[in-house]
Amino acid sequence: MVFQLKPDRKETENKTIRFPLSVIERIDEAIVNQDVTFSSFVIQACEYALENMDTDGPTSTDETKN
């Protein structure tokens, strides 16, 4: 599946996250002339990553989550 930008979504909650400057620059370049905000791009990229994440790899147990 190819990552495709979609229009903005409405229901949100504020979260603070720090990005390396190089990642910010790459995102800014990717959204030039696109009808998408920085936040919308990040949300869509995270959703894409979650939907396409390899779930067959090692997982942690309840004992190691603390």
Image (tube, rainbow, N blue to C red):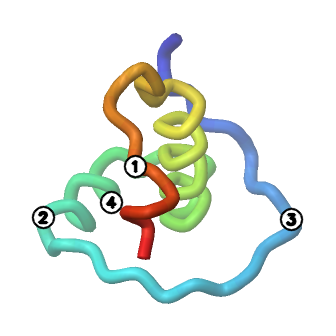
Q: Residue at x 49, y 64 (%)?
A: 38
Q: Residue at x 47, y 26 (%)?
A: 55
Q: Which residue is mark 1?
A: 60
Residue 47 in the image, given as x and y percentages of width and height: 59, 43
Q: What is the spatial separation of the Cα atoms under label 3 and label 4, in whole angstroms?
A: 21 Å
Q: Which residue is mark 4?
A: 28
- Sequence-wise first label, 3 or 2: 3
Q: Which residue is mark 2?
A: 22
Q: What is the spatial separation of the Cα atoms under label 2 and label 1, in whole angstroms?
A: 31 Å
- Secondary structure beneath dot 3 equals loop
User: Which residue is outermost to the left?
Assistant: 22
- Sequence-wise first label, 3 or 1: 3
- Secondary structure beneath dot 1 equals loop
Q: Nearer the viewer, residue 1 or 63?
A: 63
- Sequence-wise first label, 2 or 4: 2
Q: Amino acid at mark 4?
A: Asp
Q: Is residue 46 above or below residue 51?
A: below
Q: What is the spatial separation of the Cα atoms under label 2 and label 4, in whole angstroms?
A: 10 Å
Q: Is residue 44 above or below residue 14?
A: above
Disc 4 crowd, CA 10 A, few/some/many (<14, 14-19, 20+): few
- Sequence-wise first label, 2 or 1: 2
Residue 10 in the image, given as x and y percentages of width and height: 86, 65
User: Which residue is outermost to the top?
Assistant: 1
Q: Residue at x 51, y 49 (%)?
A: 46
User: Which residue is outermost to the right?
Assistant: 11
Q: Amino acid at mark 1?
A: Ser
Q: What is the spatial separation of the Cα atoms under label 3 and label 2, in whole angstroms?
A: 28 Å
